[in-house]
Image (spheres, grey):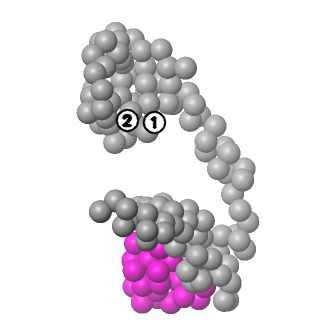
Amino acid sequence: MLRPETSASTTAVETLPGYPAGHAVAPNLLDYSAFRSSFSWDAARRELDRWSRGRKFVDALYLPAPQFRIPAGDTIVCRCEEVTAGDVRQAVSDGARLATEVRAATRCGMGLCQGRLCMPTVAGLIERYASTPAASAGRLTARPPVRPLPVTALADEV
């Protein structure tokens, strides 16, 4: 558990997930002046680093085999939109170098999962066929609605 200290340092909020980000938006939601005086960005950074230590090891340990990251033929890459590996390869050969460009060309990542299931595979295909690192392919941002809604739910809001 994060134990706030009494030091006044600042860090870019967008680089810190979770607790520090919540601390940054809290002033818009409630009065938390007592907590603010005891909060420390340095303590939050240390706590985040402590909890993140094993992440690279776990990612490497559970990295899927290449045949699953870089499927061949007409293997379905995006189940939500029924996009195949061939469709993604075609988009890459047409010049797509970013995940957002592949999404625009193929609709891959526009389905119910918003790319959470298919984007690692798309990044692997971009890395293989565009000769660019998978990390530079970028990430997709979720688009509302994040889960399916009946039209009546939206109509009730109007």
**Label 1: which secondary element:** loop
Whether label 2 touches label 1, CB < 8 Å: yes
Q: In the image, which disc is placed on residue 142?
A: none
x, y percentage for residue 124?
57, 70
Q: Residue at x 35, y 12 (%)?
A: 38
Q: Is residue 148 above or below residue 33?
A: below
Q: Is residue 157 left or right of residue 47?
A: left
Q: Is residue 77 above or below residue 46?
A: below
**Label 2: which secondary element:** helix
- Density class for disc 2 (Cα within 10 Å; few <14, some 14-19, many ≥20) is some
Q: Which residue is mark 2?
A: 21
Q: Is residue 69 left or right of residue 15?
A: right
Q: Which residue is mark 1?
A: 18
x, y percentage for residue 158?
29, 62
- Within the magenta stretch, is there residue 47? no
Residue type (three-letter) at the residue carrying disc 2: Ala
Q: Would you identify the image quadrant in which residue 136 lies?
A: bottom left
Q: Would you identify the image quadrant in which residue 41 lies?
A: top left
Marks 2/1: CA–CA distance = 5 Å
Q: How many marks?
A: 2
Q: Is residue 142 above or below residue 44?
A: below
Q: The N terminus appears in which quarter of the rendering?
A: top right
Residue type (three-letter) at the residue carrying disc 1: Gly
Give whichever of 30, 108 is nearer the camera. 30
Residue 14 appears in the figure: yes
Which span of residues is magenta-colored?
A: 84-110
Q: Would you identify the image quadrant in which residue 154 lies?
A: bottom left
Q: Is residue 82 left or right of residue 151?
A: right
- Most extreme residue toward the top is 6
